[in-house]
Each structure stands twice: as C-alpha cells, then as structure tokens.
Amino acid sequence: MTSDFFLVQKIRNGDELAGNQFVEKYYSLIYQYCFLHIRNKECAEDMTQETFVRFYEAILKDANIRKIKNYLYSIAGNILKNYYKKKKEILLDQLPETEKDNLTELEIRLDIERALDQLPEEIKEITILFFFQGLKQKEIAALLHIKLSLVKYRISKAKELLSKQLEVGRE
C-alpha cells in the first residue's frame, strides 16, 4: 500500500489536510504538464485545478483508481484534448518575466519550445511525459494505452527530430 492510497482514503473520509497534502504532492507535475502543452500560465492553472476537481469527483464516487499519478495525467490529457477541440488556433506564447542577465537562458528555452511545437502531436506528448515530466517508458505506455516498443520508437524519433531542429535553430 502506498502513501497515495492512504491519502485517498483520508480524502474520501473528509480529511481536508490529506486533500491539501495530495494537491501539494502533484500540483506542480500536473501544472507543468499542462503548461508545456499550451504555454499559457492562467490556462494551465485552470486546467490543473480542473484536473484535481475531476479527480476528487472520481474518488468521492468510489472509483477504483490503481495508479494515482497516471490517473491524474489521464484526466489532464483529456482536459487538454477538449481544450484543443474547442480552440483550434494556437495560443501565443507568454514569456516569463526575466532579467536581462537571463537572456541566453530565455533564448535556449524559446528554441526548445519552438522545436517542441514542430513535433507531431503523438511524439510531442511522449516527449513531454518522458523528458519534462520524468515518467518511465512503461508508465507512458500504460498511460497512453500503447505498446512499450512504440513509446521507445517515439522517444528515439523525438531525439532525432529535436536535435535536427535545434541544430538548424543555432546556425
């Protein structure tokens, strides 16, 4: 039994402290996942909150959830899919506030974001989960309901495409 299991049981029993601990544990992961897809701070925050609302609704209905983190990613992924269905145009990037000293770091980040935007959607999804969220290949396969071999292929393809795009961007 994991600590997540016990947190969920406490949440089901109305323990607000357990609910806060759970959100603190996973909020930044889900926020980053949403932000990497849409790069809009407010939208990513809204999507993250919606993810937790849906999660709480599911556990209060006694849904049998085995892998909590995967379930959260699955909810967030569905929210993102609905967002893209409703909004077909691409949002403009909102740059974080930075000092002039961080200009090189910002340029590198923008290069990576542009390269990420160039990837086909199925490769982009795996790239975000693997490189930015730190999920293992098996976890990604289970989360996306695809074979492990396909995950491995898409990761290698992402490396290839990103290295080409980042080389072109530097020339």
Image: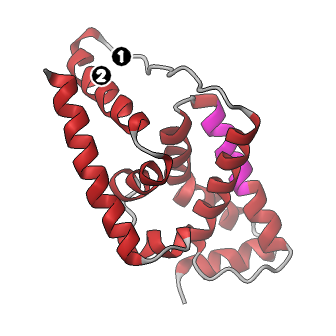
Mark 2, Cα crowd under 10 Å, few <14 / some 14-19 / many 20+, is some
| Residue 61 relative to residue 42: left or right | right
Residue furthest out toward the right: 61
To which quarter of the image does residue 66 belong? bottom right
Seen at 64% across and 26% down, the residue is: 89
Which quadrant, please, contains the C terminus?
top left
Is residue 136 visible to us here?
A: no
Q: Which region shows up in magenta?
A: 43-52
Q: Dot 1 surroundings within 10 Å: few (below 14), some, or many (20 or more)? A: few
User: What amino acid is found at the position of numbered circle 1 in the picture?
Assistant: Thr
Does the magenta portion include 47?
A: yes
Q: Nearer the viewer, residue 164 or 22?
A: 164
**Helix, strand or loop status at disc 2:** helix
Relative height, residue 79 to residue 58 (above, below): above
Instruction: Give SS at disc 1.
Output: loop
Check disc 2 and give the amino acid type: Leu
Residue at image x 39%, y 68%? Answer: 151
Q: Is residue 48 above or below residue 6?
A: above
Q: Nearer the viewer, mark 1 or mark 2?
A: 2
Q: Quadrant of the N terminus?
A: bottom right
For the stretch drawn in magenta, the main secondary structure is helix
Would you name the residue on which mark 1 appears?
Answer: 98
At x 64% / y 29%, what residue is drawn?
42
Q: Residue furthest top?
A: 100
Number of callouts in the render?
2
* Residue 169 picture location, percent across and down: 22, 24
Residue 106's disc number: 2
